[in-house]
Image (cartoon, grey):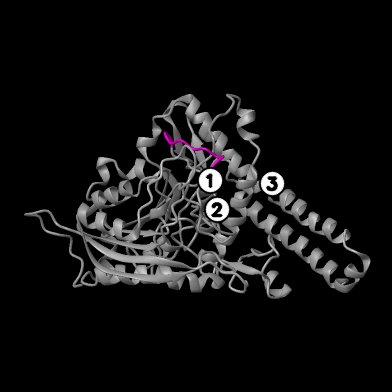
Amino acid sequence: MASASLDLNPQLHPEQSKLSSQEILAEQAHYHKVLSAYKNYLQHSLANHRKRKRDFLTLPARHRQLVSPAWHEKWDVIATCIRVNAAFINQVISGQDDLMEFDGDEGPLPNTGHSHDCRHGHDHSNGHSHSHDHISDEASSPAPRHTHDNSHPPVPHAETPPPHHSHIHGATPNHNTSNSNSSVRQAQPTEADMDKVRSTIRQFVRDWSEEGCAERDAVYKPMTDALEKAFERVPTDQRGALSVLIPGAGLGRLAFDVAQKGFSCQGNEFSFFMLIASNFVLNRLHEPHQCTIYPWVHSLSNATTSSNQLHPVRIPDVLPGNIPKGCDFSMTAGDFIEIYSSAEHTGRWSAVLTCFFLDTAHNIIDYIEIIHNVLADGGVWINCGPLLYHFEGIPGEVSLELSLDEVMDIVQKVGFDVIEQRFIPSTYATNPSSMLKYQYNCSFFVAVKKPRIGEEPVERTTI
C-alpha cells in the first residue's frame, strides 16, 4: 500500500476570516487558555492527589496501619503516573503555541510553519486535531461569530460521571478579554478546562490504543462497513474519487480509518482541546506504542484492583500516515454550521459520517439540513450515537431536544430514504475494568439522499 500526503494542519475556512480585531483577540485568548489548561495539568493533578494524603492522615492510627505500607506505595506510584502523563502532555503541546495563526483583520489563519507531509509514512518533526467531549464539558472553538459561554458547559459523552459525561464538541468559553497580548497568553484555566484535559487523555485511549479497540469495533466498524457496502460497486483503487465528510472528528481515528480504506476524507473539529491533541497524534508520532499514559489515575472510585487503576496505555496502536495512493486526508477547524452551510459545499460530498455528533447541536434540524445539502444526490449519511443533548437545561443557550422517532421523521421529511436502522450498545472512553460503566444505546442508521427529479444519483450501492 502506498502512502499519500496528509494535509492535516487544521485549515480555517475563508468564511471565518471576517473577524474584527476584538474577535481576533478573543480567539487568541481562548486558544491560549486551552494551552494554559494543558500546561497546568501537573500542578493541578498533583494538588488533587496531595489531598488524598492529607485525608489519609486524618484517619485514626489503627486505620492507617491496616492499609499501610501498601497505601503509601500506591500513592507514590500514582504521583509518578501523573508525572508521566504530564510529560506526555508536554510532548502534545510542544511547538503548538502558534498552531493557529490569528492575523490581523484577515482573521485566524492556519499555521503553515510545520510540515505535515507523510509521503514516507509520517513527517512528525515538530509537529495535528479534535475533541468531542466526547470528552467533557464545554468544548472550545476556533470558529468566529459563535457565542461561547464557559460558565455553562454542555453535557458530554465520556464517563465522569453522568450527566456530565462527554464528547468535547460543545460550547466554548467566554470571549471577553483584554486587548493586551500578555493577558491573551495568561488566561487562567477553570476546573472545567482541567476536566477537558483529563477527558482528552481518555480520548487517546478510545481512539488510538489497543485498549480502545472494543469501543471502536462497536461503533466505528459498523460505520465503515456500511460505507464500504454503500460503495461496493466502486473499485477499491477508485475510492479516492469519493469524498467523505466527518464532522466532530475528535482525535481523528474514524477519519483515518475511512482514509485507510481508500476514501478521500475530511474531518472537521470545533474544539481547540481536540485540535491540539489530534495534531500531535496524526502528525508527530513516528512509531507504534511510542507514548505511555495512565488514564485512570485521576479518580480512584470503582476500581477492582490497584493494578487496573495503574494500568499503562501505550499509543498509538497503529501509526497514522500510510493510506492508499490517490486518497486525500485533511482536517478543518471551526464550526460545522458556519463552514459547511456555504455554497461551495452544496452537493460536494459522497458520504457524511456522524459519530456521537448530532446531540452537540443547539438545533439538530440545522445539522440534518446541512448534511442533506452537502451530500450529492444518492449520497449516503451514516450515523451512530446517542441523543445526549449538550445544551439541555443550560441558561442562555438555545436547545432543541427531540426524541429519536421525531429525529427520524425529520430526516425523511428533509429528503432522505432511511435504508437501515438499529441500535448499537456502546460505552464511551470507559475504563474496561471499572465497576461502573455507562452504556449508550446508540442510534445507528444509514440514509440515502433522494435524487432530484431528472438527475442521476451518485454511483453507490445495491442495498
Using a 10 Å C-alpha cutoff, classify the residue at mark 3 as few (fewer than 14 neighbours), some (14 to 19) or many (20 or more). some
Q: Residue at x 53, y 43 (%)?
A: 99
Locate residue 450 relative to residue 219 in the image: left or right: left
Examine the rendering and report whether any part of residue 328 can be seen: no
Tell me the kind of residue under disc 1.
Pro
> Looking at the figure, which quarter contains the C terminus?
bottom left
Q: Quadrant of residue 211?
A: bottom right
Cα separation between marks 2 and 1: 8 Å
Say which residue label 1 marks.
153
Residue farthest left in this picture: 454
Examine the rendering and report whether any part of residue 95 can be seen: yes
Which of these two is toward me, 383 or 124? Answer: 383
Tell me the kind of residue under disc 2.
Ser
Q: Secondary structure at mark 2?
A: loop
Using a 10 Å C-alpha cutoff, classify the residue at mark 2 as few (fewer than 14 neighbours), some (14 to 19) or many (20 or more). many
Residue farthest right in this picture: 61
Q: Is residue 238 magenta?
A: no
Up the image or down, 363 lies above or below 428; here it is above
Q: Is residue 151 magenta?
A: yes
Q: Quadrant of residue 418?
A: bottom left
Tell me the kind of residue under disc 3.
Asn
Q: Position of residue 96 (x, y in %)?
A: 57, 45
Cα separation between marks 3 and 1: 20 Å
Q: Position of residue 291 (x, y in %)?
A: 63, 64
Q: Position of residue 80 (x, y in %)?
A: 77, 62
Per the rendering, the mark at residue 40 is 3
